[in-house]
Amino acid sequence: MEKKIKTKKDEDLISWYNETVTAADLAEFSELKGFTIYKPYGYAIWEKIRDYLDDKFKNLGIKNAYFPLLIPESVLEKEKEHVEGFTPEVAWVTMGGKKKLDEKLAVRPTSETSVSYAYSKWVKSYRDLPLMMNQWNTVVRWETKETRLFLRGREVIWQEGHCVFENEEEARKNVMDLLMVYKEVLEELLATPVIIGRKSEEEKFAGAVETYTVEAPLPNNFMIQSATSHLLGQNFSKVFDIKFLNRENKWEYAHQTSWGISMRSIGAMILVHGDDNGLILPPLVAPIQVIIIPILNGTDDKKIIEYARDVEERLKKINIRAEIDDRTIYSPGWKFNEYELKGVPIRIDLGKKETEERLISYKIRVNGKKESMKFDELNKFTDLLENIQEEMFQRAYDRIKSQVKEETNKNEFIKDLKDGKAIVKAAWCGKEACEKKIKEQTGAVSRVIPLEKEELLDKKCIFCGKPAEFNAYFAQTY
């Protein structure tokens, strides 16, 4: 029986999303509430992101390491603001076998405290700096909100980087370097346009001096945080006594950063690109870039299969991820539906005519175009996949331009956000009290404050009327 997405994307985005993720065999919830099983097809997308980022990190001089899953309560609680931000979500281990532990152990919600504890022992001189490490791991946050596959779960697969520097200038450069790496992975690998900038005081990471964010606008005018980069300043180094003898032979507290991206970025990509028939995957992260479907007729099957293998071999030689689906238990129509649902960028159909004439008949997932070429022209598929990647990004980018509304009228600001009619950009004071009231009345918050200094849209804050400090983007989020 063919799988079909029953919900229309533009009618109920999140129901469409849930159906699509499960029907496409990306992931499903486990027997433990809020915990996810990532199936091979879904995990393969994460592997592409991981490999891409791992090279980027190493080119910046960042080395991989691994820190323990469990953190003693006394260590976690050292940084007051940090622990207050995470306490409601921390899972605790209190028993070892049948014996009660002398001290509760937190299941890692993030690793700033654990890493800082180690760095306090490793950093003694400016010669030990910079110290730049990353770890690929999982964290547990006991979410009380509704969990959603990829977007929000109690166990999160991600990477988290932790760096130590001599001064604030070097730390800020690291924060911006990683912010740009994350922008690149979203836009170039996942073909997902983003808006980058700073978080408000209310929305910043617990314990950070400043938080910078990569925000993906969604088709329903929500925005989703896809990656973050934090300037921690000396907040953790003073608590954990990470200090070093500087070049003047004086003791000084180090400057720290942390940064991370998770599988939520995959969720953002799905929400941005999919359609009523399922996934549409950018070629660079698609586990299968080209699926080959032999159209068998019972008399020429051997020749058709042999030709399909020739096509697969030629594509693999030019480093294209191609596969043949020659299963006879499913009809060609069933397979067409299956790979459209899974978002495979290109489908090749090979029957008697193609085999006899050495032709390639293919269909492009993103735009539905059907074309053909000669077998000897298969090298053109490299350019074709590049064009698909670019088209996907441009389509999403053009849509986003139409979603953002610059607003100076308070009533329209409230109405647009409350009804989800737009992502609203407006002049704002940036005060926490003002943001809390905006959230109470609209359900939205500031998602991102632009990096570059801009001309204010208005001299007064859109909501409270006090002097505006900067422009900001407002939207609801998942």
Image (spheres, rainbow, N blue to C red):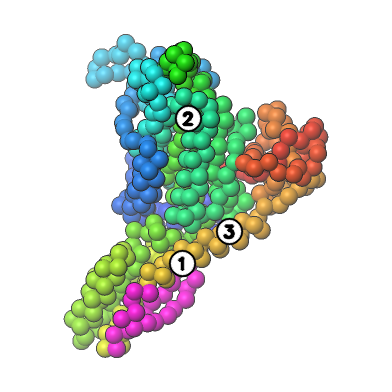
Residue labelled with disc 2: 257
Check the image and report above or below for 89 versus 55.
above
Q: Give the residues drawn in magenta, as a range.
A: 357-380
Q: Amino acid at mark 2?
A: Thr
Residue labelled with disc 1: 388
Horizontal side, residue 347 vs residue 440: left or right? left
Horizontal side, residue 170 vs residue 413: left or right? left
Residue labelled with disc 3: 397
Residue at the outermost front position: 248
Residue plotted at (47% across, 76% down): 369
Using the numbered discs, state the Cα–Cα distance from disc 3 to disc 2 in whole angstroms.
30 Å
Dot 2 surroundings within 10 Å: few (below 14), some, or many (20 or more)?
Answer: many
C-beta proximity under 8 Å, tags 1 and 3: no
Between 41 and 418, the one nearer to me in the picture: 41
Could you say whether the residue bearing mark 2 is in a helix, strand or loop? Answer: strand
Mark 1 vs mark 3: which is more N-terminal? 1
Horizontal side, residue 261 vs residue 304: left or right? right
Could you say whether the residue bearing mark 3 is in a helix, strand or loop? Answer: helix
Mark 3 vs mark 2: which is more N-terminal? 2
Q: Nearer the viewer, mark 3 or mark 2?
A: 2
Using the numbered discs, state the Cα–Cα distance from disc 1 to disc 2 in whole angstroms.
36 Å
Residue plotted at (39% across, 56% down): 285
Quadrant, the C terminus:
top right
Q: Nearer the viewer, mark 1 or mark 2?
A: 2
Using the numbered discs, state the Cα–Cα distance from disc 1 to disc 3 in whole angstroms.
14 Å
Horizontal side, residue 234 vs residue 362: left or right? right
